[in-house]
């Protein structure tokens, strides 16, 4: 079980490094796991459900400044306030999609279902894998949960 | 590059990102149509000539796979290449998309080079 947990965590770390690094090349080499990279007080949240052979969710939290900078990186310039949440959701989807393809034996049997209301999250089960990452003055947190 | 492109994604940010990447890869279109899901995309296609469709898979109402299958069966006169642009990239998922009628597959996050390699040859035909 411990080994499985370590593999899930390693996979999450690799996925986040790869995806964030592709979107935001300046992070390459400087993104690292960190404790308490995201304060619980004010965050931009995004989540997506896994449905099918694996049931659960991927949840992303970013400090607002990181979320705004991420959206600007994606768009190649300034972004409107409503685009920040949209970009965060897309980042969450990408990480979930890549993690699923890497970890599940038959990823095609598990779909991704977008959830609109990211604030309404019931944390019923302990996370399979969590990670907090920091680079420059930015931070984001990820968690993958299985729904029982 | 003349012509018309249809961008289908429930994320307006991703539609902008795809449009920007097309331009950076040297593909500028006279007309850019946008749709937020597969059903809206079918409406946009009605009576319109498009040269290229770029389409997400996971969307509300009608998915990208449902859209491309519907387009190929109900609008056989539409010969435009359809490129699936999606977060999921397993071999089985790619096969499903091709079987539904997609022409090519690009995984998010994508680069300008990905578009030059996988999309540009389709519109340069």
Image (cartoon, coloured by chain):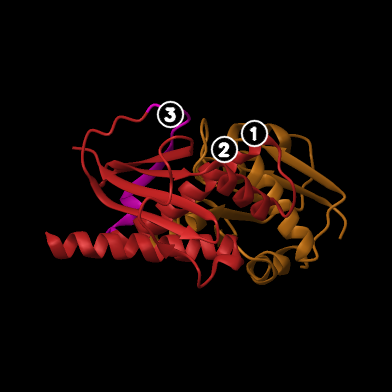
Residue to which mark 2 is pinned:
A85
Image chain in orange: B
Residue visible at 57% across and 54% down? B84
Q: Is residue B53 visible?
A: no
Q: Colour of chain A?
A: red
Toward the viewer: B71 or B3?
Answer: B3
Residue to which mark 3 is pinned:
A119
Tell whether A78 sits left or right of B109: right
10 Å neighbourhood of mark 3: few (<14), some, or many (≥20)?
few
Instruction: State yes or no: discs 2 and 1 in contact (Cβ < 8 Å).
Output: yes
A57 lies above or below B118 = above
Are discs 3 and 2 both within one chain?
yes
Toward the viewer: A83 or B93?
Answer: A83
Specify the segment rendered in magenta.
Answer: A104-120
Specify the label residue A82 is tagged with. 1
Residue A125 among those drawn in magenta: no
């Amino acid at each position: 079980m411990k080994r499985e947990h370590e593999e899930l965590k390693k996979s999450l770390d690799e996925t986040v490094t790869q995806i964030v690094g592709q979107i935001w090349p300046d992070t390459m080499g400087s993104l690292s796991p960190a404790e308490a990279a995201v304060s619980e007080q004010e965050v931009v949240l995004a989540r997506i459900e896994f449905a099918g052979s694996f049931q659960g969710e991927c949840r992303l939290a970013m400090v607002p400044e990181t979320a705004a900078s991420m959206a600007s990186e994606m768009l190649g310039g300034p972004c409107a306030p409503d685009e920040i949440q949209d970009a965060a959701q897309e980042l969450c989807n990408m990480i979930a999609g890549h993690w699923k393809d890497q970890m599940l034996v038959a990823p095609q049997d598990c779909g991704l279902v977008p959830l609109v209301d990211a604030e309404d999250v019931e944390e019923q089960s302990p996370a399979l894998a969590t990670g907090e990452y920091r680079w420059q003055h930015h931070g984001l947190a990820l968690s993958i949960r299985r729904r029982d | 590059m003349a012509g018309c492109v249809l961008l289908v994604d429930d994320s307006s940010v991703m539609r902008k990102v795809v449009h920007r990447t097309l331009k950076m890869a040297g593909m500028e279109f006279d007309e850019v149509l946008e749709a937020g899901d597969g059903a809206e995309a079918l409406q946009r296609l009605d009576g319109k000539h498009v040269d290229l469709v770029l389409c997400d898979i996971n969307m509300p109402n009608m998915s990208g796979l449902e859209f491309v299958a519907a387009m190929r069966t109900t609008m056989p006169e539409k010969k435009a290449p359809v490129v699936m642009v999606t977060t999921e990239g397993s071999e089985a998922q790619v096969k499903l998309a091709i079987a539904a009628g997609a022409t090519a597959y690009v995984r998010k996050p994508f680069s300008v080079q990905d578009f030059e390699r996988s999309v540009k040859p389709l519109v340069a035909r």
